Amino acid sequence: MKLQWAFCPICHNKTRLKIREDTVLENFPLFCPKCKQETLINVTQFNISVIKEPDAQTQSRQICEKSQFVGYFS
């Protein structure tokens, strides 16, 4: 059975996770102790693919986009 270390997709350093050739992971949060980043990954047969998350919007921007400006009260 072959084993390999999982490498961080951001800084390319070794993580604390070892992967066997029959390992299958879906939506796994891989944490890198070196760069302190967490990345969602999928793993099948030593192939690691990164899952892109949509960028978060601020709450005020979400509220402004949903509401329409009518006018001022005098």
Image (cartoon, grey):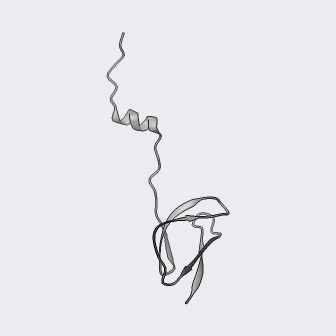
The picture quadrant where one finds residue 74 is top left
28 sits to left or right of 5: left
Q: Is residue 19 above or below residue 57?
A: below
Percent position of residue 37, x then y: 60, 59
User: How far from the left and from the top, in percent, is residue 29?
Assistant: 52, 64
Q: Could you tell me which quadrant the N terminus lies in?
A: bottom right
Report the residue that reaches farthest toward the top: 74
**Which residue is painted at 51% across and 80% down in the image?**
46
Please state the total of marks drawn on the protein image.
Answer: 0
Which residue occupies the foreground of this view, 12 or 21? 21
Front residue of this view, candidates 26 and 47: 26
Residue 18, x across and y down, in percent: 59, 77
Residue for point 58% across, 84% down: 3
Task: Find residue 9 and report its horizontal and vertical position in percent.
Answer: 57, 67
Occupied quadrant, residue 67: top left
Name of the residue lying farthest toward the right: 34
The image shows residue 67, relative to residue 17, as above or below, that is above
Q: Residue at x 45, y 38 (%)?
A: 59
Please state if 31 lies on the left or on the right of 63 as rendered.
right
Q: Is residue 35 left or right of residue 40?
A: right
